[in-house]
Image (cartoon, rainbow, N blue to C red):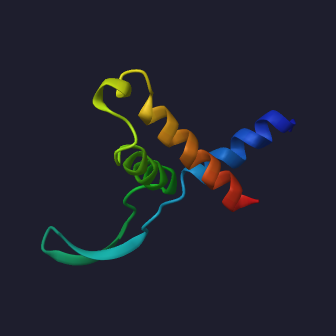
Amino acid sequence: MNDKYEYIEEQSKMLNQYAFPGRQMALIGNTEMEVATQGLTKREYFAVMAMQGLLAGQFTTKEWKYFNIGRSAVEIADELLKQLES
């Protein structure tokens, strides 16, 4: 396997880890069962937190249209995940 495909495979594993995995009870038909819950992925959670920080008064409303806050938040999340893996 070449380096490009190994990198993509590593990225895929990292991006699909859940931030808050857990279990909860659910009623399925007439039976109460324990089911797995995932919630947000780590990437989604970190991007949310980064976006919150970016929107916390750093920019005026007029500046927002010139700055892609969503893309920047995801880039910050990806960089944090990369640093955590190393």
Q: Is residue 73 left or right of residue 33?
A: right
Q: Is residue 79 left or right of residue 17?
A: right
Q: Is residue 79 left or right of residue 73?
A: right
Assign the C terminus to one quadrant of the image.
Answer: bottom right
Q: Is residue 6 left or right of residue 48?
A: right
Closest to the observer, 53 or 37: 53
**Residue 32's x, y, as percent?**
20, 78
* Residue 68 vertical placement versus 73 (above, below): above
Name the outermost residue toward the left.
30
Assign the N terminus to one quadrant of the image.
Answer: top right
* Residue 84 vertical placement versus 1 (above, below): below
**Residue 62's x, y, as percent?**
31, 24
- Name the residue: 40% across, 73% down: 22
**Residue 57's x, y, as percent?**
34, 45
- Name the residue: 46% across, 49% down: 50
* Residue 27 vertical placement versus 80 (above, below): below
- Name the residue: 49% across, 33% down: 71
- Name the residue: 43% across, 55% down: 45
Closest to the observer, 13 or 55: 55
Q: Where on the picture, by quarter, is residue 33?
A: bottom left
Name the outermost residue toward the right.
2
